[in-house]
Image (cartoon, helix red, strand yellow):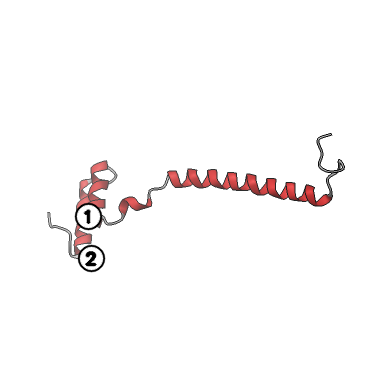
Amino acid sequence: MWWFGDGSLNGWGYALMTVSMVLFWGLVIYGVVWLLRSAGRDDRADVGRSPEDLLAERFARGEIDEPEYRQRLEVLGQRYGSASKL
């Protein structure tokens, strides 16, 4: 009734529909996964920031205590020569 031509679809038509449907849903799933993974990642946040700034931020958030902060800052000063002496 709603078929093309004489009412039958040959094997190539079925194969093309199957492949195109698998490709379509594969691209949709890939796009959703890519969006979810890229939304949770912020790789550009630390670009251009000094190691001392990152260390100070960790100290401010409470991830490290004061003795560890001072020890790491001293190591950074020895390694890079840019850390200020406290």
| Helix, strand or loop for disc 1 | helix
Left or right: 66 in relation to 13: left
Residue type highlighted by circle 2: Arg
Q: Quadrant of residue 83?
A: bottom left
Give whichever of 43, 5 is nearer the camera. Answer: 5
Q: Which mark is on residue 79?
A: 2
Q: Quadrant of residue 61?
A: top left
- The numbered mark, 1 or 2, whose residue comes first in the sequence reads 1
Residue 68 visible from this viewpoint: no
Residue name at image x 51 percent, y 47 percent: 34
Residue 14 visible from this viewpoint: yes
- Outermost residue on the top side: it is 1
Left or right: 59 in relation to 38: left
Q: Which mark is on residue 52?
A: 1
Give whichever of 43, 82 is nearer the camera. Answer: 43
Where does the N terminus fall, quadrant-wise?
top right
Give whichever of 52, 69 is nearer the camera. Answer: 52
Q: Residue 67: where, in percent of width, then height?
A: 21, 50
Q: Residue 30: where, in percent of width, then height?
A: 57, 47
Q: Residue 78: where, in percent of width, then height?
A: 20, 65
Residue name at image x 77 percent, y 50 percent: 15
Mark 1 or 2, which is nearer the eye? 1
Residue type highlighted by circle 1: Glu
Q: Residue 4: where, in percent of width, then height?
A: 81, 42
Left or right: 17 in relation to 56: right
Total residue callouts: 2
Q: What is the crowding at mark 1: few (fewer than 14 residues within 10 Å), some, or many (at least 20)?
A: some
Marks 1 & 2, CB-CB < 8 Å contact: no
Residue name at image x 35 percent, y 52 percent: 44
Where does the C terminus fall, quadrant-wise?
bottom left
| Helix, strand or loop for disc 2 | helix
- Outermost residue on the front side: it is 5
